[in-house]
Image (cartoon, rainbow, N blue to C red):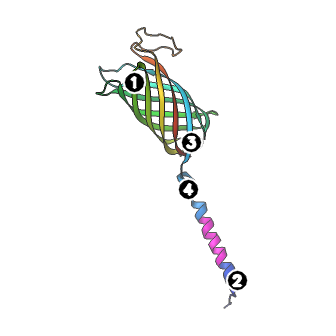
Amino acid sequence: MTKLNSPKVLGLALGCAALVLGAFYASADPKHSEPKHFLANAGTTFILYPPSTPGGPQSHNIDGVVLFSSLGDCTLHATANLVTTATPGQYLVTDGLFTFTTADGLSTLTASTEGTLIANPANGYMGDIQYKVTFTGGTGRLAHAHGSAELHGFVYFTDIGLTQPGQDSNAYGIVPAGSSTGKACWLLDGDLDY
């Protein structure tokens, strides 16, 4: 039987400790790190379609550009529903789905949203929007993205209740009769990990 002297025992103990710590750090899942704070600003256009039933929700498509402090330049395509409330000039925004695409086109970031639109009492063509945004994943380097944010912004309706099917006054192409078009600008403030 070989006796180990103190320096050999200490060296062996330190070596084992280093192996255990190395294995621990190597097994840490980077997908579950703490989200990082970001800011983003956007300019978008939208089409608000007439309800399929009187008084029912109105679906709308949103497209635009977004500058993220963490992701850089992105494009946006989104859908959501606008629901009338009992309070005149106040609406709920439900079932929102946002897809942000990075400038190189290699990654997308997806989010679900819900919020409110409150018409400006001085001008019904304008309104303030507030959404809660929950990031739900994506593709490419953003496949495991998660986090949340708050969106605050302003909308302006440019054509209300279009009556001419196929009207192309704002380069939207064919817009169904009874639709409305508009523009919005907004800020996004939140936390995101990817």
**Residue 45, position as x, y percentages in the image:** 51, 22
For label 4, the crowd category at 10 Å Cα-Cα, with few meaning under 14, some 14 to 19 and many 20 or more, is few
**Amino acid under disc 3:** Phe
Residue 151 x %, y %:
48, 35
In this picture, is 129 found above or below 139?
above
Which residue does the numbered mark 3 point to in the structure image?
A: 38
Frontmost of labels 1 and 4 is 1
Q: Is residue 25 left or right of residue 127?
A: right
Q: Which residues are magenta?
A: 13-23
Q: Label 3, label 2: how many angstroms apart (C-alpha)?
A: 51 Å
Task: State whether the magenta stretch is mostly helix, strand or loop.
Answer: helix
Q: Which quadrant, please, contains the N terminus?
A: bottom right
The one of 82 and 14 positioned closer to us in this rendering = 82
Q: Earlier in the sequence, mark 2 or mark 1?
A: 2
Question: Relative to residue 11, is residue 86 drawn left or right?
Answer: left
Identify the residue at horizontal 30%, vertical 22% (top origin): 55
What is the crowding at mark 1: few (fewer than 14 residues within 10 Å), some, or many (at least 20)?
Answer: many
Which amino acid type is marked by label 1? Ala
The residue pinned by badge 2 equals 8
Q: Nearer the viewer, mark 2 or mark 1?
A: 1
Q: Would you place residue 138 above or below residue 87 in this image?
A: below
Q: Position of residue 35 (x, y in %)?
A: 54, 49
**Which secondary structure lies at badge 3?**
strand
Q: Looking at the image, is mark 3 or mark 4 nearer the viewer? A: 3
The disc, 2 or 4, on the residue closer to the chain's N-terminal end is 2
Considering depth in this image, is 44 or 32 the residue closer to the camera?
44
Q: Mark 1 falls on what kind of element? A: strand
Q: Which residue is mark 4?
A: 29
